[in-house]
Amino acid sequence: MHNSLGRNPGYVFDNDSVHSDELHRCLTDAYDTRTFDRLAETGVTTGWRCLDIGSGSGSVARWLAERVAPTGEVVATDIKPHHIPDGPCLTAVGHDVVTDPLPEAAFDLVVARLVLQHLPERLAVLSKLVRALKPGGWLHIEEFDASYEPPLLTPDEESARLYRAFLDAKCAVMRAGGGDPHWARDAPAAMRAAGLVDIDPRLRIELRTAGSPGLRMQLNHTYHLRDELLAVGMTEAELADVRALMLDPSFCAASSVIYSVHGRRPQVGGAPGRREAPAEDGLRPRPEDAR
């Protein structure tokens, strides 16, 4: 779950954890290529102004910055933005999307990858993101629906039970913070209710095998969320056993259902890509964001 917003209620992955760098690598390896392909479908190009919320390591923001150069701008926000490197056309900003304001009608493209399902205030944030779009601008949302990610091949039935118990515990950790591990399936309807048009949901399921980025990410979660998993009832022995299972070359499982959804703010006038002078919108680097 890519976009690290800090260990606040509603988001369970600490961007300052010793396990954060590996989590970012897994997310990049597993999902960036598909994300970039989808973002390219919006037509993002030179001169666009883009916003990437909960940017995590900044891999999506860096790709966008290359697309909008030399005259565009990408603003990459995170509560803890120190993993995001500044560069040409790219500015990293400390920003809490729940409580901090966003400028209205300011962006040609807004990206929210693996963010909203973690936030109890997701619908209010969604409305804020829609208002931040220029007329004709695009919102891109990616989320996991964790209601489906079954083990497919395990050494025995006890191993399958253990893996399912780990998945259930992880969902319980999310729910304890107000997250919804199944919200991805509601995203298209929520985007339409927020006023977007041309809603275009795409779904996919992948195979998780030993050493694959998707299963490496699951393995990382057993360390990254160790304390939280223990708090909802898993034991140290169970965590050790499920780690060994995920390293077993014979093991494989289905991924969760990955939703990639586009929606567009209705066109009232103008067009995406028209370059405007940046407004004073609060999305400028603050002294405390300096790395």
Image: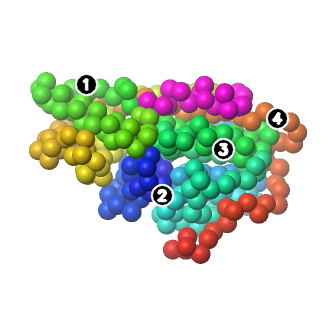
**Which residue is at 68% across, 53% downward?**
102
Query: Gap between marks 3 and 4, in whole Å?
Result: 16 Å
The location of residue 64, given as percent across then percent down, is 62, 52
* 122 to the left or right of 276: left
Count residues near mark 3 (Cα–Cα under 10 Å), then give few for <14, some for 14-19, many for 20+: many
The location of residue 219, given as percent across then percent down, is 27, 45
**Which residue is at 53% across, 27% downward?**
186
Image quadrant holding the N terminus, namely top left
**Which residue is at 44% across, 54% downward?**
8
Identity, as a three-letter code, of the amino acid under mark 4: Gln
Marks 3 and 4 close (CB-CB < 8 Å): no
From the viewer's side, name the closer residue of 10 and 79.
Answer: 10
Residue indicated by mark 1: 152
Q: Mark 4 or 1 closer to N-term?
A: 1
Tell me which secondary structure the magenta stretch mostly adopts.
helix
Identity, as a three-letter code, of the amino acid under mark 3: Leu
The location of residue 240, given as percent across then percent down, is 14, 46
